[in-house]
Image (cartoon, rainbow, N blue to C red):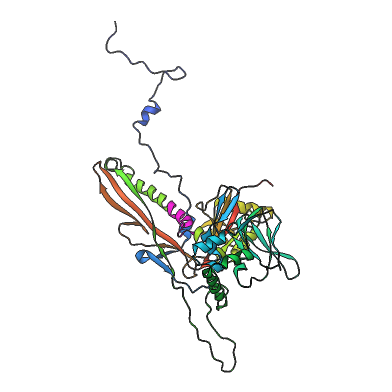
Amino acid sequence: MTTAAHRQVPEESAAGRAQLSLGIAAARNLATTTKTVPQMQGISSRWLLRTLPWVEVKGGTYRVNRRLVYEVGDGRITFVQEGAAVRVVPAELGELPLLRGFEDPDALRALAGRFEQREYAPGQVVAEQGGPVDRVHLIARGKVEKLGTGQYGAETRRGVIADGGFLGAEVLAEEPGTWKFTARALTACTVLTLTRDAYEETAGRSERLRAHVRRREAEKDLPRNKKGEAEISLASGHTGEPVIPGTFVDYELSPREYELSVAQTVLRVHSRVADLYNDPMDQVEQQLRLTIEALRERQESELVNNPEFGLLHNADYSQRISTHSGPPTPDDMDELLSMRRGTKAFFAHPRAVAALGRECNKRGLALDSADVNGKPVPAWRGVPILPCGKIPVTERGTSSILAMRLGEEDEGVVGLRQTGIPDEYEPGLNVRFMGINEQAIISYLVSTYFSTAVLVPDALGVLENVEVFHSPS
């Protein structure tokens, strides 16, 4: 007969032996766990946010006043592809210098319809130095190199024109002249061509078009400096009593204004969580910390990619160059560096930095090292190369490298923000309590206000078509 009270039989371990002490699983129920704050894999180094000099923008708008510039229209052309056929978007012909500002859609459509598509194989000549400029070439796909003759007769490379570029825009002028270089296909190219005869036929039916081109041509005779700005008349080294020229500095009549952009989100936390689960960590504080990290990541991405003010979209076309062979080489970096005074930093996707390192290794070179905020980073010619994962890499494995001069005093690139805003949590970022709803959920509006500005065109340069995928040698 059994009794109600009998001895508990000890549990047996996996090896068949009786357990002699308290198990780990049970003991953990009474222990205080040592834990970390919530971790977030999406946090990057954000070198761009840390490097940009930030300018206070009161009133939410920043106006960039510049000297009057006569040279316009050195832009890129956009195309429409339908299978193997390519057409130029008529309005995009306004990027040609002599057509800049021309807004007659009928005339532009008529011009666009006269372009003929041609295919060029690598090494094939598109235009010959010394020959008459009798047609304009629009590069829809591929790369074309410009070749000239040096002082001692050797062939010299004068640049590369890639997708969206053009050659022979002066064919629209009254006297087009001759080709000053030879254009040769560096890769397989698709080119749209408009002959001089086809242009004259079309222009003969549009007085507005002819008048516009004549007006643009007349601007060539206005005094300007090598950057295209209205000249400031000066006199120096004179003797006797010559009349000293009077002058004034002309400004753009419609300077660009940058309005602060905003990145926002609503953080929601249940009041029960905020009340009961705040030990040892404040739940609202941790939720807010991760939310702000995500907003800062978005902010840096917008500074690079936003179509209105992003750096990739606001680099002047005269400051864009293409790689000569695909991957970024020391020659490409030197050319990019030589396009401006006082370059303070390069920004590149980490894969582009690695591609540059491979090219240096092939030549027996090594990247320099620079100290930035106490951290060693790779450098070229002493200029730090800072990683920026927000610069995109296309499906074809190409990216871009940015080169910048920084700060208002150096007429460079600046970040824009306004501090001192209501409920400010960090500079230019505020957290505003929005209330508690009927489900007892607390809401906070988290906002950050920002933009960026390029004060003069040569403050920002871009090396385009940078191949970052590793090709077997």
Residue 298 belongs to the span the image colors magenta: yes
Query: Does residue 315 show up?
Result: no
Extreme-front residue of the structure:
205
Extreme-top residue of the structure:
1
> Which of the pair 416/420 is nearer the observer?
416
The spot of residue 252 in percent (x, y) is: 46, 73
Give the quarter of the image for residue 330: bottom right
Secondary structure mostly taken by the magenta-highlighted segment of the chain = helix
The quarter of the image holding the N terminus is top left
Query: Does residue 268 show up?
Result: yes
Extreme-left residue of the structure:
438
**Residue 452 sits above or below residue 43 on the image:** below
The spot of residue 472 in percent (x, y) is: 67, 45
Count of residue discs:
0
| Residue at the image point whose x is 61% and y is 72% from the top | 174
Residue 367 belongs to the span the image colors magenta: no
> Which of the pair 401/259 is nearer the observer?
259
Extreme-bottom residue of the structure:
240
Q: Is residue 74 left or right of residue 184?
A: left
- What is the span of residues highlighted in magenta in the rendered image? 297-311
| Residue at the image point whose x is 53% and y is 78% from the top | 231
Give the quarter of the image for residue 55: bottom left
> Which of the pair 40/15 is nearer the observer?
40
The spot of residue 43 in percent (x, y) is: 45, 48
| Residue at the image point whose x is 75% and y is 66% from the top | 154
Q: Is residue 388 left or right of residue 55?
A: right
The spot of residue 450 in percent (x, y) is: 40, 59
